[in-house]
Amino acid sequence: MKNHRYCVIMAGGIGTRFWPMSRQSCPKQFLDILDTGRSFIRHTFDRFAKIIPIENFIVVTNKRYKSLVLEHIPELKEEQVLCEPIGRNTAPCIAYAAYTLKRRDPKAEMIVTPSDHLILNEEEFIRVVESSLEFVEYRNALMTIGIQPTRPETGYGYIQKSNAEEICKVKCFTEKPNREMAEVFLESGEFLWNSGIFIWKVGDIISAIEKHLPEHASLFSSIEGDLGTENEAKSIERVFSACRTISIDYGVMERADNVYVHNGNFGWSDVGTWGSVYQHGKKDRYANALSSDRINVYDTRNSLITVPKEKIAVVSGLKDYIVVDTADVLLICPMSDEQSIKSFIEDVKFSSGDKHI
């Protein structure tokens, strides 16, 4: 079955929480925010290329990012990049990939992954993925990978396990809890973080979409004959304009009765905020994460400071701050206020239009 294994990379997000570095023209997944020498999407491709043939990759992205995908993963052919005309969350994205794969290879096993996560222990990660693939091969199962939590994180969704085995049925999903609830989840030992990585056979996810999202199934099945032809773009435009915006978690995973979770512990982070970049960044003796040795800090602690490599910066008197400088935008805000970045963007958009967004 290994030649029937496919990897679907979801790469259509705008990455607003990483503004001003992440922009509509070049969002987070195409950036090297952690200064590793590779973009997030390139890391994702390289990780899965260890077990998936290059011709069995599919990237689903917004049509404006097709050229960026091919620039970062030049090994792909154009037909391996599926272009969404507008964002409609993960359920339509996954349905588009699933119906495309059904036409190409009805025996396909799908790994569905975001394009912008950090995995520190890739060897263990690959073991978990291959174990999941083996589990779903002969079962009607929708698999998600759960992460052993290390702290009462309020920014992640949670999955309640049915037992302590490495692979088990899911009891329930819980969206981002408050701090008190997250502490209860951590103490109980019954909950995992929801990684947003899924593994299933193409026939099983399509059956689940037909059952739980029949309007989406109807739309995509109506254009099956156009997929892979010159009529695809026009038909997808029509389907996405009619599609309800909904996540695969809410639309399918929370409703299906054949959902399993594989417990994972491999140094995972969705690197969803500047705060998480700070957590993973190299620190100086005052716990500052600095992007360059040309940044001079005085009486400054526990701060993330990112400036263009050619720029000299002097920062004095900050504690627990985010400073991100780009060619045309400077962001300075307390770490505790980073959830306000989306509202900052709206204000900038209102006063200056889209040119800085």
Image (cartoon, helix red, strand yellow):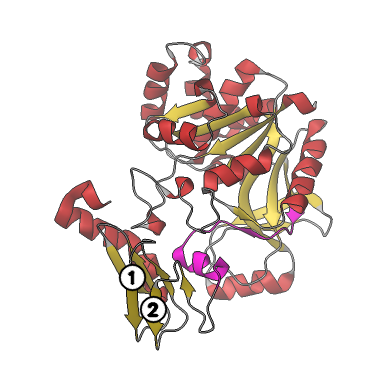
Residue closest to the eye, 54 or 11: 54
Residue 342 quadrant: bottom left
Residue 344 quadrant: bottom left
Q: Name which residue type carries label 2.
A: Asn
Q: Which residue is mark 1?
A: 312
Query: Percent x, y for residue 228?
Result: 52, 14
Q: Are marks 2 and 1 in contact (CB under 8 Å)?
A: yes
Residue 321 quadrant: bottom left
Q: Name which residue type carries label 1.
A: Ile
The magenta segment is 262-282
Q: Residue at x 62, y 43 (%)?
A: 253
Q: Residue at x 54, y 52 (%)?
A: 37
Query: Percent x, y for residue 339?
Result: 39, 66
Q: Which residue is mark 2?
A: 296
47 relative position to 34: left or right: right
Answer whether residue 206 is visible to the viewer in this image.
no
Is residue 265 covered in magenta?
Answer: yes
Query: Percent x, y for residue 59?
Result: 53, 33
